[in-house]
Image (cartoon, helix red, strand yellow):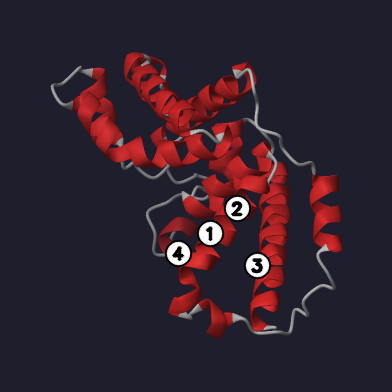
């Protein structure tokens, strides 16, 4: 007599049954916050303070605004912890609160930082000179210690030139390491939009670095 298909496969999972979602690594922190444990809020700041600051500063472009956003976002997360349902990762929920607070701060600022459109970015890149051939291998120059500080400065400046929505999406993906579905949930956009924004941001940054490295080599 042949065993059931799921037994023959060597697993205990029956056909058609989805595996449960992986445990949230922040589950212990969430429980501490829910029970108002001593030190819970401090643990939240210790784990996410620097992460959300990086996102906030890139969206607001202002250190004072970013610090205020971090305080507001983490305070709101601790205060509204009972509204966290666990349908998404806790980190995604924190990033969403931070992004919303940062965009609100940027909208309400009296003197908002000027921001370049994609048309402007494309034009300025085209005017910078002929494109660098993709076959050129810049890896030896990228490893040059003498260029590290300059490269970081060029990269930070290029990231700051990205439109706000693309900048936030890129940072969440390439800096914070969130997946496309997590970013889509965080920013409330479609996964395809996440993929498109990250792709365009990478192309722009690669172009900026290529122009800089080409000039340095010359």
Camera sees residue 141 = yes
Seen at 60% across and 19% down, the residue is 109
Instruction: State left or right for residue 117 relative to residue 53.
Output: right
Name the mark nearer the viewer: 4 or 1. Answer: 1
Circle 4 SS class = loop
Can you tell which quarter of the image residue 69 is in? top left
Q: What secondary structure is found at the residue carrying circle 2? A: helix
Q: Separation of disc 1 and disc 2 at Cα?
A: 6 Å
Q: Position of residue 15 (x, y in %)?
A: 52, 50
Q: Residue at (45%, 42%) from the top-left corner?
A: 54
**Mark 4 or mark 2: whose residue is earlier in sequence:** 4
Q: Which residue is mark 2?
A: 157
Q: How many marks?
A: 4
Q: Nearer the viewer, mark 1 or mark 3?
A: 1
Q: Residue at x 85, y 46 (%)?
A: 119
Q: Is residue 129 above or below residue 172?
A: below
Cα distance between the residues tagged 2 and 3: 11 Å
- Sort mark 3 into few (<14), some (14-19) or many (20+) by Cα contacts within 10 Å: many
Q: Is residue 110 above or below residue 161?
A: above
Find residue 44 and report its image quarter. top left
Q: Are marks 1 and 3 in contact (CB under 8 Å)?
A: no
Q: Which of disc 1 and disc 4 is earlier in sequence?
A: 4
Name the residue nearer the viewer: 155 or 81. 155
Determine whether, in the image, residue 191 is placed left or right of residue 49. Answer: right
Q: Which mark is residue 153?
A: 1
Q: Residues within 10 Å of mark 1 (few under 14, many from 20)?
A: few
Please provide percent x and percent y for residue 143.
48, 80
Image disc number at residue 209: 3
The answer to whether the residue labelled 2 contacts the one labelled 3, judged by CB atoms less than 8 Å apart, is no
Q: Give 205 or 217, whichever is nearer the viewer.
A: 217
Q: Between disc 3 and disc 4, whose residue precedes? A: 4
């Amino acid at each position: 007599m042949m065993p059931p298909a799921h037994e023959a496969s060597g697993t205990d999972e029956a056909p058609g049954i989805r595996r449960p979602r992986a445990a949230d690594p922040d589950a212990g922190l969430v429980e501490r916050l829910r029970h108002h444990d001593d030190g819970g809020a401090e643990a939240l700041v210790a784990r996410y303070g620097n992460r959300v600051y990086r996102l906030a500063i890139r969206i607001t472009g202002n250190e004072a605004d970013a610090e205020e956003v971090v305080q507001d976002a983490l305070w709101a997360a601790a205060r509204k912890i009972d509204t966290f349902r666990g349908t998404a990762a806790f980190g995604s929920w924190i990033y969403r609160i931070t992004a919303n607070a940062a965009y609100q701060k940027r909208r309400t600022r009296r003197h908002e930082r000027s921001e370049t459109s994609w048309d402007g970015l494309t034009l300025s890149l085209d005017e910078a000179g002929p494109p660098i051939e993709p076959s050129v291998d810049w890896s030896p120059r990228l490893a040059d210690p003498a260029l590290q500080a300059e490269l970081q400065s060029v990269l930070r400046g290029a990231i700051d030139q990205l439109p706000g929505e693309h900048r936030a999406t890129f940072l969440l993906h390439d800096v914070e390491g969130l997946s496309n579905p997590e970013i889509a949930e965080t920013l409330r956009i479609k996964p395809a939009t996440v993929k498109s924004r990250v792709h365009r941001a990478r192309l722009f940054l690669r172009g900026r670095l290529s122009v800089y490295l080409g000039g340095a080599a010359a």
